[in-house]
C-alpha cells in the first residue's frame, strides 16, 4: 500500500486537532451556557413571581384581596396562577400538560415534569388575614433552554463539515508551502545522485527557520563533499603524473639496453638508471600508501617512550654523507636525555625529511643545525638552514600534497612534494604543532612543538 505523504499526514493531524478543539469548545460553551441560562432563568422566575405578587392587593384588616386591573398571567415565557389556601386555582392558568396535583412550596424552586415536558415553578405565599393565605405561582417550560442547546448543536453539525473542509484546504496549502524547501532538497539530492554534479546547491532564499538551517547544512555538506572529491581527484591525478616520469624513464632505458647494438657498459649504466628510478617509484608509492592509509584512519602509530635526543643524533649521522656531498656542515644543539611518547620510525621520518630538505635547499658551504630542547615541559625540535629560503607566498602552501616551490628545478630531482605533508601529519598525530619561519636567500627554520604529558 502506498504510504501517505508527509503533507497529507500533517494536514490530517492539523484538521483533526482543529475539529477536536472545536468540539471541546462547543461542549464547554453548551454546558456553561446551559448552567448560566438555568441560574439566570431561576432568578428571573423568582423576580417575575414577586412582581406578580405586587399585583395582588390584600387587605389584612378586612381579610380581602383583589387583583390589579392590568395584571397579566403570562409574561416573558412565565405562566402565573393564583391558588387559595386549599390549593385550588382561583385565578390565572397553568401551562398545558402541567400536572394539577403539585404541592405548593413557599419560596422554593421546584422542577416538575410529566412524561414529555419539564417545568420550573416558584411559589410565593401571600398571607392576608388570620390564617388566610393566597399562593402565587410562576412556571416556565424548559423548552427555551433546550432550544438554545439545540441551536448550538445544529450549528456544530453544520459548521463541522464546513470547518473540516476549510481546515483541510488551508492546512494542505500551508503544509505544502512549508515543505516546499524540503521537496527542493530532495530534488537537488536526487539530481546530484543522478548526474554526480556536486556543484549544485539547494536554493535557500525562500526557506526559513529550521528548514533554512537544514538546507544550509545540506549545502555545506555538498561543498565539503565537492571539496573532498576534488582533492581526491587532484591527488589521483598528481600521483599518476609523478609515477609516469620514472615509469617512462625505466621503459626507455630498458628498451635501449635491450637493443642488439648496445654495449655492455651502456647496458650497465641503463640498469643503474632503472634501479634509481625504481627506487624513486618505490619511495613514492610508499609515501602515497602512507597518506592514503592516513586519510582512511588506517595508519596507526605505535607509541612508546622514544629517546628523542638519541634519535636526533642518529638522524644527523644518517645525513652525514648527504651533507658532505652538498658541502654543508651539520651542526647540533641537542639537550641530552629527552624523551617523547611516540612512534620511533615516524619520528625518525620527521628528522630525515626536514634534514634532507635543509641540505637539498641549503647553500653551498652553508650549514644546517638541528636543535632539541625542553622548555616548560614541552619538547621543541628545530631544523634550521641558511639556504635558499621560501618566499612568503609559498609558506602556507608547502604543507599541501605535491606542492613544490620550484617545480622546474625540482622536476626529476626525485622530490615529490609529499614530504612536508607527511611530516605535518605525523606531528599532528603526536598532538604536536609545526611551523616554518623563512626568508628568501637567508634560510628557513622548521619548528616542531610536542605537547606536555610526554616523559
Ligand atoms: P619535496 O619532496 O619537494 O622536498 P616537501 O614537501 O618536503 O617536498 O617540500 C615542499 C617544498 O617546500 C619543496 O619543494 C621546497 O620548495 C620547499 N622547501 C621545503 N624545505 C625547504 C627548505 N629547508 N628550504 C627551502 N625550501 C624548502
Image: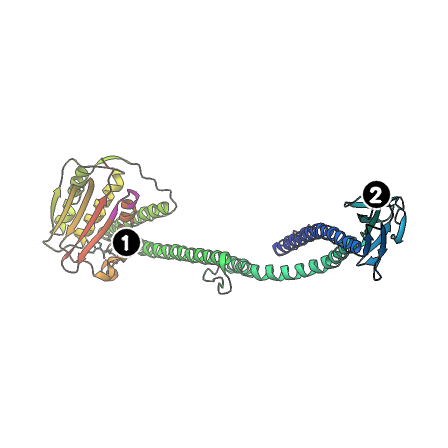
Identify the residue shown where x is 73% and y is 52%.
Answer: 43
Ligand 1 closer than 8 Å to the CB at disc 1? yes
- Seen at 76% across and 53% down, the residue is 50
Residue 237 as seen in the image, left or right of residue 212: left
Chain-order first, disc 2 or disc 1: 2
Residue 181 vs residue 305: left or right?
right
- On the question of residue 316 being in view, the answer is yes
Is residue 307 or residue 214 the one in the foreground?
214
Residue in front for this viewpoint, 211 or 419? 211
Question: Residue 4, percent across and down?
Answer: 65, 53
> Could you tell me residue 21's position as x and y percent?
65, 52
**In the figure, residue 156 lies in which quadrant?**
bottom right
373 or 401: nearer the eye?
Answer: 373
Q: Is residue 96 visible?
A: no
Q: List the residue tagged with mark 2.
A: 131
Q: Locate residue 166 relative to residue 225 in the image: left or right.
A: right
The magenta-colored residue range is 428-433
Mark 2 burial class by Cα count in 10 Å: few <14, some 14-19, many 20+: few
Quarter holding residue 300: top left
**Front tag of 2 and 1:** 2
Q: Is the C-beta separation of discs 2 and 1 under 8 Å?
A: no
Give the residue pinned by disc 1: 399
Dot 2 lies on which element? loop
Amino acid at each position: 500500500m502506498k504510504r501517505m505523504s508527509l503533507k497529507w499526514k500533517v494536514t490530517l493531524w492539523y484538521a483533526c486537532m482543529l475539529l477536536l478543539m472545536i468540539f471541546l469548545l462547543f461542549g464547554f460553551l453548551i454546558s456553561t451556557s446551559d448552567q448560566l441560562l438555568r441560574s439566570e432563568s431561576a432568578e428571573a422566575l423568582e423576580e417575575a413571581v414577586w412582581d406578580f405578587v405586587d399585583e395582588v392587593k390584600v387587605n389584612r384588616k378586612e381579610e380581602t384581596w383583589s387583583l390589579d386591573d392590568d395584571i397579566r398571567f403570562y409574561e416573558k415565557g412565565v405562566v402565573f396562577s393564583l391558588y387559595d389556601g386549599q390549593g385550588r386555582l382561583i385565578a390565572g392558568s397553568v401551562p398545558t400538560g402541567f400536572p394539577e396535583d403539585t404541592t405548593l412550596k413557599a419560596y422554593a424552586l421546584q422542577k416538575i415534569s410529566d412524561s414529555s415536558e419539564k417545568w420550573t415553578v416558584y411559589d410565593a405565599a401571600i398571607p392576608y388575614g388570620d390564617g388566610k393565605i393566597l399562593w402565587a405561582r410562576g412556571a416556565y417550560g424548559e423548552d427555551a433552554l433546550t432550544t438554545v442547546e439545540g441551536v448550538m448543536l445544529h450549528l456544530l453539525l453544520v459548521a463541522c463539515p464546513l470547518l473540516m473542509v476549510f481546515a483541510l484546504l488551508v492546512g494542505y496549502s500551508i503544509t505544502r508551502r512549508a515543505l516546499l524547501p524540503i521537496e527542493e532538497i530532495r530534488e537537488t539530492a536526487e539530481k546530484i545522485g543522478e548526474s554526480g554534479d556536486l556543484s549544485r546547491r539547494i536554493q535557500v532564499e525562500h526557506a526559513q527557520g529550521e528548514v533554512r538551517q537544514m538546507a544550509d547544512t545540506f549545502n555545506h555538506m555538498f561543498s565539503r563533499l565537492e571539496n573532498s572529491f576534488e582533492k581526491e581527484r587532484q591527488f589521483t591525478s598528481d600521483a599518476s603524473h609523478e609515477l609516469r616520469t620514472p615509469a617512462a624513464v625505466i621503459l626507455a632505458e630498458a628498451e635501449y639496453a635491450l637493443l642488439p647494438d648496445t654495449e655492455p657498459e651502456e647496458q650497465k649504466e641503463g640498469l643503474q638508471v632503472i634501479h634509481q628510478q625504481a627506487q624513486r617509484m618505490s619511495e613514492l608509492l610508499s609515501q602515497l600508501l602512507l597518506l592514503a592509509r592516513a586519510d582512511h584512519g588506517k595508519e596507526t602509530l605505535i607509541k612508546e617512550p622514544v629517546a628523542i635526543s638519541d634519535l636526533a643524533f642518529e638522524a644527523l649521522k644518517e645525513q652525514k654523507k648527504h651533507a658532505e656531498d652538498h658541502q654543508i656542515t651539520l651542526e647540533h644543539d641537542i639537550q641530552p636525555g629527552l624523551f617523547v611518547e611516540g612512534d620511533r620510525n615516524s619520528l625518525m621520518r620527521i628528522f630525515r625529511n626536514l634534514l634532507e630538505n635543509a641540505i637539498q635547499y641549503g647553500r653551498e658551504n652553508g650549514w644546517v643545525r638541528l636543535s632539541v630542547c625542553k622548555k616548560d615541559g614541552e619538547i621543541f625540535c628545530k631544523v634550521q638552514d641558511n639556504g635558499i629560503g621560501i618566499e612568503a607566498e609559498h609558506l602556507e602552501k608547502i604543507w599541501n600534497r605535491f606542492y613544490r616551490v620550484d617545480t622546474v628545478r625540482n622536476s626529476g630531482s626525485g622530490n615529490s612534494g609529499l614530504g612536508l605533508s607527511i611530516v605535518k601529519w605525523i606531528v599532528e598525530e603526536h598532538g604536536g604543532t609545526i611551523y616554518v619561519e623563512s626568508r628568501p636567500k637567508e634560510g628557513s627554520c622548521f619548528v616542531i612543538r610536542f605537547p606536555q604529558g610526554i616523559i
